Image (cartoon, grey):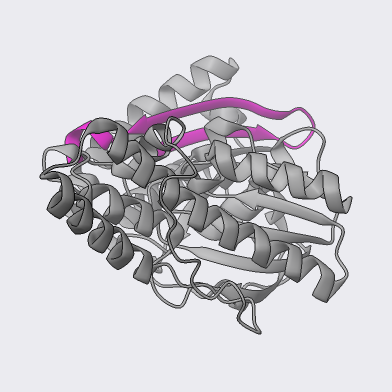
Amino acid sequence: MLVLGIESSCDETGVALYDTERGLIADQLHSQMAMHAEYGGVVPELASRDHIRRVTPLTRACLAEAGKTLQDIDAIAYTEGPGLGGALLVGASFANALAVGLNIPVIGVHHLEGHLLSPLLAEPRPAFPFLALLVSGGHTQIMAVRGVGDYEILGETVDDAAGEAFDKTAKLLGLPYPGGPLLSKLAEEGDPERFTLPRPMLHSDNLDMSFSGLKTAVLMLKKQVEAEYGSIDEQTRKDICRAFQEAIVDVLVSKCVKALKQYGLQRIVVAGGVGANKQLRAALDAAAAKRRFGVFYPPLKLCTDNGAMIAFAGAMRLQYARSAGSFTVKPRWDLSTLPKA
């Protein structure tokens, strides 16, 4: 079966082709980062309009990359939610219109399930069951994953997600949008010993997390440095970035190790944009070597939103394919409501 996957939940338009025998055979992506940078954040209306402009050319490019035609496609998977309503409607309407024309079924995919399953596109592939750390711009959750659709949320952030905390802290430090990846890059050159920031909920009796207070801690530290030195030089900014990132990573790794022990799991799968963070990967790898558990990551290019994860998730849920035509989108969609595949 050849599945076309379409991702349009926020500010990336992704189109990919997944063959159930050959694996991923084509993957095209357009990021709207440069367009939204002018406004300091994602503008939903602009995002939707850009998806409209990009989805058809990307689909053609994807087919050309794979050496396939529209008639070769057996099903179309698209992101049904969660995400920006207007952006989701672009992908959903395009997928359904194309499927009606080709007389093939469609599969509505949960965006977070796409992220959760994306490490299965890498080698070696983790076996079920495993612990999943989902760390994206809008979500930070720790889950027990026992199979496709069999997800149990063990802990999550009670306020800002890790990705949100990165972006908001970057803005406090005067970094341009999108600040999270730039903050991480600056942190690599920061002195880990100079500043120490709090580790919220590190020793709580549950697996929940909180990152909102870290922004306040960074703001207070910034004011303290400015009062003492008059301004923040580049190295000091890097040192603050390092202290912030150290705090986030310590909490995430500690909670994951605690969850592994509590639920008797032997593998961790990391998914989502923050999963590309070098320091997080290094810390998890070190913990895995010390405590003898496995840790798996998606390819770096599949950490952010992409069509490949939607095509793959759709291929895993072919039994839920439905006739194209009438459709809805779900800007809010609880992952736990998904049926088991």
> Front-most of 44 and 258?
258
In the image, taking residue 79 as reference, residue 291 lies left or right, namely: right
Rendered view: 167 above or below 161: above
Image spot of residue 262 (x, y percent): 81, 75
Residue farthest to the front? 228
In this rendering, is residue 213 above or below 238? below
Measuring 44% from the left and 56% from the top, which residue is drawn there?
196
Q: What residue do we see at 29% from left, 42% from top?
A: 179
Is residue 24 found inside the magenta-colored segment of the image? yes
* Quadrant that contains the C terminus: bottom right
* Residue 157 visible in the snapshot: yes
Q: Where is residue 253 in the image (x, y as percent from the top left)?
A: 65, 57
- Dominant secondary structure of the residues highlighted in magenta in the image: strand
The spot of residue 43 in percent (x, y) is 17, 51
258 sits left or right of 305 in the view: right
- Horizontally, residue 64 falls left or right of residue 292, namely left
Query: Is-magenta flag for residue 18?
Result: yes
- Depth order, front residue of 319/58: 58
Q: Which residue is at the front of the view, 156 or 56?
A: 156
Total marks drawn? 0
| Boundaries of the magenta span | 13-36
Please identify the quadrant where the N terminus is shown: top right
197 in relation to 20, above or below: below
Along the line of sight, the residue nearer the viewer: 9 or 61:
9
Q: Which residue is drawn at 28% across and 56% down?
A: 168
**Residue 126 appearing in the image:** no
Q: Quadrant of residue 81?
A: bottom left
